[in-house]
Amino acid sequence: MTRNNMARMPAGNCRVITLDGPAGAGKSTVAREVSRRLGLPFLDTGAIYRAITLIMLEKNIPAENSPRLRDALRGFFISFDGGRVLVCGQDVTEEIRTPEIDMHVSAYSALPEVRSALLDIQRSQSAGGLVAEGRDMGTVVFPNACLKIFLTAAPASRARRRYDERVARGEPANYGEILETVNRRDRMDSERETAPLRQAPDAILLDTTDLSFEQVVERILGYAEGARPGE
Ligand code: DC
């Protein structure tokens, strides 16, 4: 068995690890691999915000506080099955990754009503520990996490990653448009009033621009081994 295949336990019982950062920094793939190697569940909170956006667009509910939006927020159930995302039992894994969802997700996720409706769903997943990725994991959702990482990379490298992902899925992709969407989402996610994208004061900043996937994963596993005991 190689070192990479071994499940590694973080020292000091560190059970909740958060990864925050802007779009396309590689959070999902990195968090998924870290969770696999540590034997902890993985929580992709962007998928939850994307699922909410899909629900609202299908119901034609605009991104503003309204009785219809509040009703819709009470009437859904999001669950995960392996790597699949389900809304009320229906698999929406592919539908939540379209350019249309990319365009609208920041507007819905800026609404305080949406964020508070999703808080309990996210926290309820952490009972046995987890690796959670998003924008406000270390600042708002899991402020007591024992290890917090803020993952970032130059915008061009993040747009390139999203472009490659889309090409790999056989979808049409335009690098210039993707870069523009990445920059626009960064702005909206960082400038919103509720739970903006921010590095928590106790988070470790990791710039992945010049690091390979494996190097990023190894660094985080190293930090987890040295993390203080905590939640
Ligand atoms: O990580 P992602 O690209 O799948 O996230 C989609 C959007 O969801 C992102 O533009 C902002 C929002 N989001 C958020 O506001 N808070 C989170 N914890 C996760 C995602």
Image: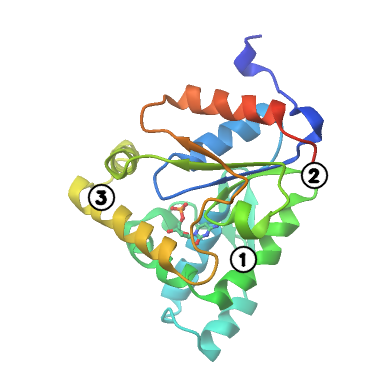
Picture coordinates of residue 186 (x, y %)? 37, 57
Q: Nearer the viewer, residue 167 or 175?
A: 175
Q: Earlier in the sequence, mark 3 or mark 1?
A: 1
**Distance from label 3 to label 1 (Cα)?**
33 Å
Kind of residue at badge 2: Gly
In the rendered view, tell whether residue 102 sits above or below residue 53: above
Q: Amino acid at mark 1?
A: Cys
Residue 38 bears which disc, if any? none
- Residue type at tag 3: Leu
- The colour scheme applied to this rendered structure is rainbow
Residue position for label 2:
128
Q: Which residue is mark 1?
A: 88
Is 221 drawn above or below residue 105 in the view shown?
A: above
Residue appearing at x 63%, y 13% in the figure: 3
Residue found 63% across the figure and 24% down from its top? 222
Which residue in the protein does label 3 denote?
A: 179
Q: Secondary structure at mark 2?
A: loop
Q: Position of residue 127 (x, y in %)?
A: 80, 50
In the shown orientation, is residue 213 left or right of residue 89? left
Task: Kindly report the distance in space between the C-alpha atoms of the residues bearing marks 2 and 3.
Answer: 37 Å
Nearest to the eye among marks 3 and 1: give it. Answer: 3
Q: Residue furthest top?
A: 1
Indicate yes or no: mark 1 CB to ligand 1 under 8 Å.
Answer: no
Element class at badge 1: loop
The first of marks 2 and 3 along the sequence is: 2
Q: Can you tell which quarter of the image residue 224 is in?
A: top right
